[in-house]
Amino acid sequence: MAETPVIYWYRQDLRVDDLPGLAAAASAGRPVLPCFILDDTLPERERPGGASRWWLHHSLAALAQDLGKLGLPLLLRRGAHADELAQLVAQTGAQTVYCSRRVEPAEAARERTLHEALAADGVTLKRYPGSLLFEPEAIRTQADAAYKVFTPFWKACLREPAPAAPAAAPDKPAAPATLPGSLSLDDLALLPRDPDWAGHWPRLWQPGTAGARAALQRFLENAIGDYDEGRNHPQREATSRLSPHLHFGEISPRAVWHAVTAHCQGQPDLEAQRHKFLSELGWREFSHYLLHHFPHIVEKPFKEEFSKFPWLGNEQLLRAWQRGMTGYPLVDAGMRELWRTGYMHNRVRMIVASFLTKHLLVHWRSGERWFHDTLVDADLANNTCGWQWVAGSGADAAPFFRIFNPTLQGKRFDAQGEYVRRWVPELAQLPDKHIHEPARAPQQVLAAAGVVLGETYPEPIVDHGQAREAALAAYGSIRSEA
DNA sequence: TTTTGAGTTGTTCGA
DNA sequence: GTCGAACAACTCAAA
């Protein structure tokens, strides 16, 4: 009789190297059966959005290849994860299920109930770290509380022993002799059809571990030397673009940490850049840390007084924002980059988020939902904390009076208008001087550039000065009522 | 326990 | 055009 296998349950850790749970499964002395379950029974906000589903498809394909090189299969299932795992356990006789832990409240709860359900059948669920540099329980203030401010949090992380060096993939684990039934990747129906809006995405992205490593290498070779400044300019290729790879776990954060550190070794002039970049990994850590310690922030404002904030909830304004038709070129460029590529530059994310929440007074959750559906790197922790930070309701958030002026931001960070011209081509012929403010351009300049406001490009849907005053008044109202 | 320094990413206004 | 102050107090974290 064939030896019963152990199961490795893949979640958002789609890699084979530096994966503690898989390493533990492989060293259990039994064949390893890796599986992935697409759980379409979950509520919408807990399932991957459209852009993420595209990425997931290709990432699973890459994972299957990487597992294949180790001689392992990747079993695919679709359905309620608990039912599917129970079935898989029954079919194989497995006594142990391994996985990487997740900190999102619903996922953590799922681990607990699954642990109990499996235990009732005499099966053990074993959870392992691997998705974060520092486990959330390990970082506490001196008063043994959870940090609420980024800088002391990150300093505390940096006082910890440095993350361990990444480990190689398990060495030739045994594969099960017989396989339970598996779906094909196409059966998961993750790719968009009718229309296939992602037809050009394979030219933009390379999901999977190989793509993650290539992105990291490109970043180290071309961009880290000017990261601190370059990262603010959306038209430059000055960021790592690792976010979707990290979200799906195609590369471990400590592999990134060590690659960056090794690259900068012996180059004192890169030390500040390295620190800046690592602190961005720190923000990813902080978001997940906050979700672990303050699970309610997925639904509710971190700062309680914001539950009284007078959001307008104007659908028309929301739609104009979503479509990149606000009449503010930098905002529209960002929203169209998102729609077209599944990605938006970080600085522009802050600007469009500030615009939605402060200029349009639309609830941050509307923006968060849109990002969830359209971003390839959509991540509950980063998305929630990012939006709450901008809206002013989050932990360590921007002060309420910090309202981005999209025109000024454009002039500062896209001075030649390259970013706007790329994503808002109907403005491409405008001279630099007017590219961020078409509504104030002289009539003959507009005519020469073929721009007809209200026809080829919208008039600003709100006036910046008035919107700013309204936002300040709205924030003032929840302060005085508090 | 009390005190003290600090806190991602900005804008506007007036000198 | 450039520069510094004001914006509004507040909470957090550590000494």
Image (spheres, coloured by chain):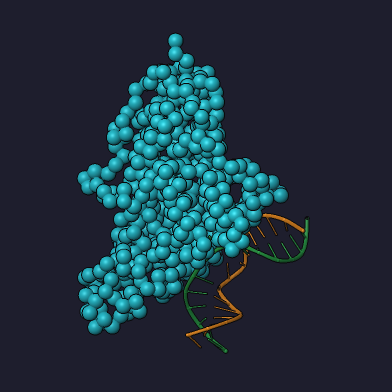
Chain colours: A cyan, B green, C orange
- Give the answer, above or below, for where A296 lies relative to A481: above
Total count of labels: 0
- Give the answer, above or below, for where A151 lies relative to A445: above
Looking at the image, the residue that sits furthest to the front is: A266
Looking at the image, the residue that sits furthest to the top is: A1
Percent from the top left, x then y, of residue A72?
Answer: 42, 27
**At 42% from the left edge and 43% from the top edge, which residue is drawn?**
A210
Residue A482 in view, yes or no: no
Percent from the top left, x then y, of residue A318?
Answer: 34, 59
Residue A263 vs residue A481, the one in the foreground: A263
**At 26% from the left edge and 48% from the top edge, which residue is drawn?**
A199
In what quadrant of the picture does the N terminus of chain A appear?
Answer: top left
**At 34% from the left edge and 64% from the top edge, which residue is drawn?**
A333
Q: Using residue A172 as the reference point, say whether residue A202 is left or right of it.
A: left
Q: Using residue A114 as the reference point, say whether residue A56 is left or right of it.
A: left
Residue A185 in view, yes or no: yes
Residue C4 vs residue A203, the one in the foreground: A203
Percent from the top left, x then y, of residue A115?
Answer: 52, 27
- Give the answer, above or below, for where A101 lies relative to A177: below
Q: Using residue A189 as the reference point, say whether residue A304 is left or right of it.
A: right
Percent from the top left, x then y, of residue A35?
Answer: 42, 29
**At 47% from the left edge and 68% from the top edge, which residue is drawn?**
A403
Residue A237 vs residue A113, the one in the foreground: A237
In what quadrant of the picture does the C terminus of chain A appear?
Answer: bottom right
Q: Using residue A100 as the reference point, say whether residue A364 is left or right of it.
A: left
